[in-house]
Amino acid sequence: MNAPAPTRPLDLAALEPAELEHALEAMGAARFHAGQIYRWIHRRGVTDLDKMTDLSRELRASLKASAVVSTPKIARKDVSADGTTKYLLELEDGALIESVFIPDTPAQTFCISSQVGCAMRCGFCLTGKMGIIRNLTAGEIVGQARVLAKDLEMLEQTFNIVMMGMGEPLHNYDEVMKSLRMLGAEQGFAMAAKRITLSTVGIVPAIERLAGEEFMPNLAISLHATTEAQRNELVPINRKYGLVQLLDACRKFPVKKRGRITFEYVLLNEVNDTPEDARRLVKLLHGIKGKVNLLPLNAAPGIPFERPSDERVNRFAKILADSGVTVSVRKSRGRDIRAACGQLIVEGAKRKSPGQQLAALID
Ligand code: SAH
């Protein structure tokens, strides 16, 4: 006879408030405890059920028997000379992800991951080299903010979140949307949607779906090229959802009052950083409420491109600015600890998850 499959305990940290209410009801407890539990976990950073002192002893005992509060563990922490802090976090199944704290930009910002690895394989990005290992759950996505805020003693402070860590957020749509609702929940961080930015490689049907969401983050698009042929090379998903189609979806996207879509453009020396590229970019963005964020390449071994000189970066930026396009150049943060854009990759970890071992074999 087969042994019965082990039932997984209920993970209280992975539930949004309404789900928590249902779970409590199913246990025969009152729904209003959901707000208390959510507050302990997500606002106060408490994971030990015994410390949730406004719950009755009976409720705590029955929760302890059937539920857990699963929380990513800090496996390693590197602090850069500029204060940027990179966290290597270990999840319940041993999978490893990275999250980054970027101070004073001027806001305090957490850069969080949406997947273990990434399937998009953009030509200049190290995370893409890992391949996709698995999606993160909403609990694991929110868990990164929870762990960073607690470790940095920022639970009471306001911060921004950018979904610009490992992974393609719109490739994990449902869990990412749930994590946004959880971050916005009043009993937790109560984040305003405008403090959250979701960056995507441009999965057009998912952008169209996002346009109908109630809790709407700022949108950033990783554009990186101005012709279909070049984007096909640099950002392979372009072969499926082309540049014209992507910009069309951006044109239709409901940007909030005074809001704009950010177009990220990684500058690769003598590849996509010429004056012609800049002029084509101006044309492409015509009629879209957008701004451009230039990302001079963060070079790394294994990446077959170079970072352009400051002169080339400035020349590119000036052509945009002179044509009336709002443009900024992303200051690279935490490069000394490999926490900069496109440098998040789990390397040299002692223990690899089965998925990671498999990925290493396939690679
Ligand atoms: N998958 C999402 C989220 C990643 S955000 C997306 O593609 O938008 C990280 C940003 O850094 C993206 O714009 C990505 O293209 C960019 N990036 C990746 N590798 C980089 C590198 N080596 N140097 C600079 N920027 C890089």
Image (cartoon, grey):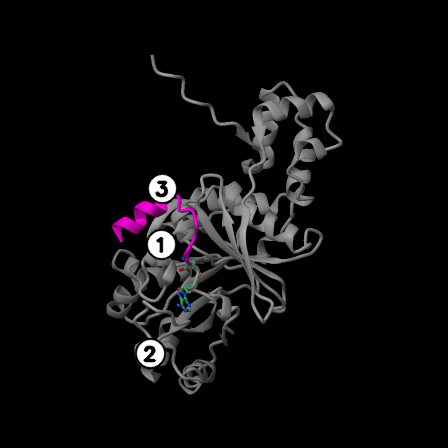
Q: Which residues are magenta?
A: 345-363
Q: Which residue is mark 1?
A: 203
The answer to whether residue 321 is visible is yes
Q: Residue furthest right?
A: 54
Q: Which residue is mark 3?
A: 354
Q: Residue furthest front?
A: 350
User: For the N terminus, which image quadrant?
Assistant: top left
Q: Residues within 10 Å of mark 2 (few under 14, many from 20)?
A: some
Q: Residue at x 46, y 72 (%)?
A: 292
Q: Residue 226 appears in which quarter of the rendering?
A: bottom left
Q: Position of residue 151 (x, y in %)?
A: 64, 52
Q: Which residue is mark 2?
A: 277
User: For the C terminus, which image quadrant?
Assistant: bottom left
- The earlier-in-sequence mark between 1 and 3 is 1
Is 51 rendered above or below residue 345? above
Q: From the image, state whether disc 1 or disc 3 is nearer to you.
A: 3
Q: Residue at x 35, y 16 (%)?
A: 2
Q: Position of residue 99 (x, y in %)?
A: 52, 55
Name the residue type under label 1.
Answer: Ile
